[in-house]
Image (tube, helix red, strand yellow):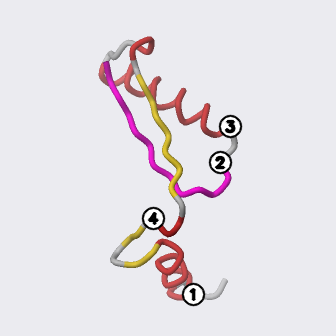
Amino acid sequence: MPYVNIRITREGATPEQKAELIAGVTELLQRVLAKNPATTVVNIDELDFENWGIGGLPVLDYRAAQAAKEPDR
């Protein structure tokens, strides 16, 4: 029984988007590893920004730093 945990920041993913993630991961496991979709469990955790960090920075600070590095469009 595969168990997949998807963690995303709390940014308003819609129920439809979450359903697409669940269906897509389930289909991928079936196609690549021949896992039974009936026994595949997918869990989506939404984390507040203050509980997520990248590269030693809170995610919002990291995003701001990355945006500052991008050339003007």
Report how far apart the C-alphas of labels 3 and 4 lie in the structure. Answer: 22 Å
Q: Earlier in the sequence, mark 1 or mark 2?
A: 2
Name the residue tied to disc 2: 13
Disc 2 residue type? Ala
Q: In the figure, residue 72 lies in which quadrant?
A: bottom right
**Residue identified by numbered label 4:** 51
Report the residue marked by disc 3.
Answer: 15
In contact (CB < 8 Å): disc 1 and disc 4? no
Picture coordinates of residue 9 (x, y %)? 53, 57
Quadrant position of the N terminus in the picture = top left
Mark 2 or mark 4, which is nearer to you? Answer: 4
In percent of the image, x 67 and y 53: which residue is there? 12
The crowd level at tag 1 (other Cα within 10 Å; few <14, some 14-19, many 20+) is few
Judge by depth and name the residue closer to the eye, 65 or 43.
43
The kind of secondary structure element at disc 3 is: helix
Mark 4 is surrounded, within 10 Å at the Cα level, by few (under 14), some (14 to 19) or many (20 or more) other residues, namely few
- Percent of width and height locating residue 22: 53, 31
Instruction: Say left or right for 6 vs 11.
Output: left
